[in-house]
Amino acid sequence: MYRHLHKAALVTAAITAGLLMTACQSGSSHSGGTTGGGNSQHTSTSKTSSKGTSKVSKTSKRSHVSGTSARTTASGTARGVSATVTGGTVGYLAPGKYTVHVPGRTDQAFFTTTDTEVHGAGKICGSPRSEARPRCTLDQLETATRKAPVTADVTIRNGVATVVRERHDVDSGGTGGSGVNATYDGTVSYLAPGKYTVAPKQGGTPQAFYVANDTVVHGAGGICGSPMSQSMSTCTLDQLETAAKKGVAAKVVIADGVATSVTEDR
């Protein structure tokens, strides 16, 4: 009897111990699988997702700003004026920016670019007595308009000049090579760089005219040279300008609105 009871007790203890060990192993395995591996995997996925979202957001933001800037520029350009202004006077405003003025109308501002074609007729470049209109540089346009407005036809597209074409216009109303042709004997006065008037001795309206690089100027002491000399002296255009600011008596031969010669009276 004692042996049977002892054996039963041992078997019961063994079964109980086995159950306890199984329960512990099962709990440990469940806890490690959920808390350790599961959380770690979730955290890693969350970080990756966060970084991916951040990159996409930044890229999207940069594209939006660039696109907006491009659209604004294009829209701004499209709103520029488009027109053809004939017989206006072109004046300098700032590097690459000018105005064209027509009496009775608001001045129109425009820009120039490296694609702008500039053609001269004596003041910007070229000869005032030539029918040809040579191609001028943007620097020559700026230099000429800094001194005085230049009569020209201007074609503007979206606020930018495509063509600036100088004209032969003078105060007498001559255009396109049809300026005044006459000889005047009177007092020559200065108007603006390269532009003068001659008031006839016999009276009448003063006649405006231009000078060019090939205008011949002869002096007899008032423009240049000496009044005591028997011969006339050849003067520069600068000397003519200085004398004309005070007024000087001379004979002026004008062809197509431009003086071919200015000869001081002796």
Image (spheres, rainbow, N blue to C red):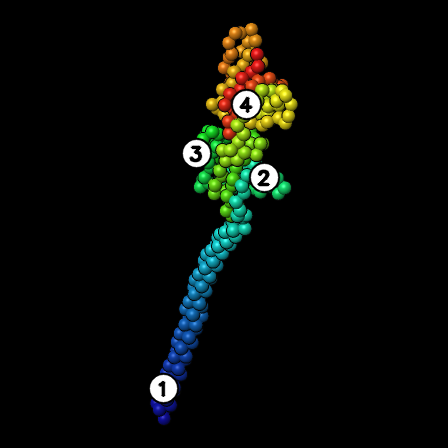
Q: Which mark is residue 101?
A: 2
Instruction: Give the x, y percent position of residue 175.
Output: 52, 35
Left or right of residue 64, residue 15 in this image: left
Say which of marks 1 and 2 sits in front: 2
Disc on the earlier residue, 3 or 4 = 3
| Residue in view at x 56 percent, y 39 percent | 88
* Residue behind mark 4: 183
Left or right of residue 25, residue 181 in this image: right
Alpha carbon of mark 2 to alpha carbon of mark 4: how far? 31 Å
| Residue in view at x 56 percent, y 42 percent | 109
Alpha carbon of mark 1 to alpha carbon of mark 2: how far? 119 Å
Q: Among all residues in the image, which is located at the extreme front? A: 202
Instruction: Give the x, y percent position of residue 14.
Output: 37, 83
Q: Does the CB distance between marks 3 and 1 fall below 8 Å?
A: no
Q: Does the CB distance between marks 3 and 4 fall below 8 Å?
A: no
| Residue in view at x 54 percent, y 41 percent | 86
* Residue behind mark 1: 11
Say above or below: 165 vs 252: below
Q: Does the CB distance between marks 2 and 4 fall below 8 Å?
A: no
Instruction: Give the x, y percent position of residue 96.
Output: 51, 38
Label 2 neighbour load within 10 Å: few <14, some 14-19, many 20+: many
Say which of marks 3 and 2 sits in front: 3
* Residue behind mark 3: 132
Disc on the earlier residue, 2 or 4 = 2
Alpha carbon of mark 3 to alpha carbon of mark 2: how far? 24 Å
Alpha carbon of mark 3 to alpha carbon of mark 1: how far? 127 Å
What amino acid type should be assigned to the residue bearing mark 4?
Thr
**In this view of the protein, which residue sits in the foreground, 185 or 146?**
185
As helix, strand or loop, the secondary structure at mark 4 comes to strand
Instruction: Give the x, y percent position of residue 229.
Output: 53, 7
Say above or below: 34 vs 206: below
